[in-house]
Amino acid sequence: MVAENIKAFARSQGYESALQLGKWHEYDAYEPLYSVKKACPIGPPLMILVNGETIRMSTPEEAYQQIDGK
């Protein structure tokens, strides 16, 4: 997946950009980044998950599994 497509997806979800975290299960995982000029919402630490041409946000359950190392 082209990095610009991932950043465009992040922007479409209200984020500024995305930082590559590495692999998580069968996905390339990215941390969505907020603009320092905007307030950061409170909620689960969601990830952007990429598998081939598919880009999606993680579910809250997936986000917590990644933190727990599962």
Image (cartoon, rainbow, N blue to C red):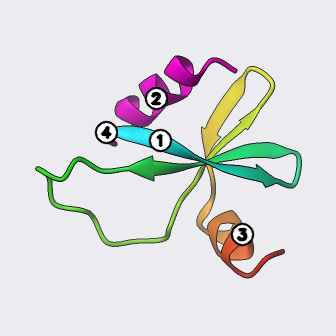
Disc 2 + disc 1, Cβ < 8 Å: yes
Residue at the disc numbered 2: 7
Q: Which quarter shows the N terminus? A: top right
> Is residue 42 located in the magenta-colored stretch of the structure?
no
Q: What segment is highlighted magenta in the picture?
A: 1-15
Majority secondary structure in the magenta region: helix
Q: Amino acid at mark 3?
A: Gln
70 with respect to 45 (left or right) = right
Q: Which mark is residue 16?
A: 4
Q: In the displayed orientation, state which residue is furthest to the left.
A: 37
Mark 2 / mark 3, whichever is N-terminal: 2
Mark 4 / mark 3, whichever is N-terminal: 4
- Element type where label 1 sits in the image: strand
Q: Amino acid at mark 1?
A: Ala
Residue at the disc numbered 3: 66
For the residues labelled 2 and 1, the Cα–Cα distance comes to: 6 Å
Residue at the disc numbered 1: 18
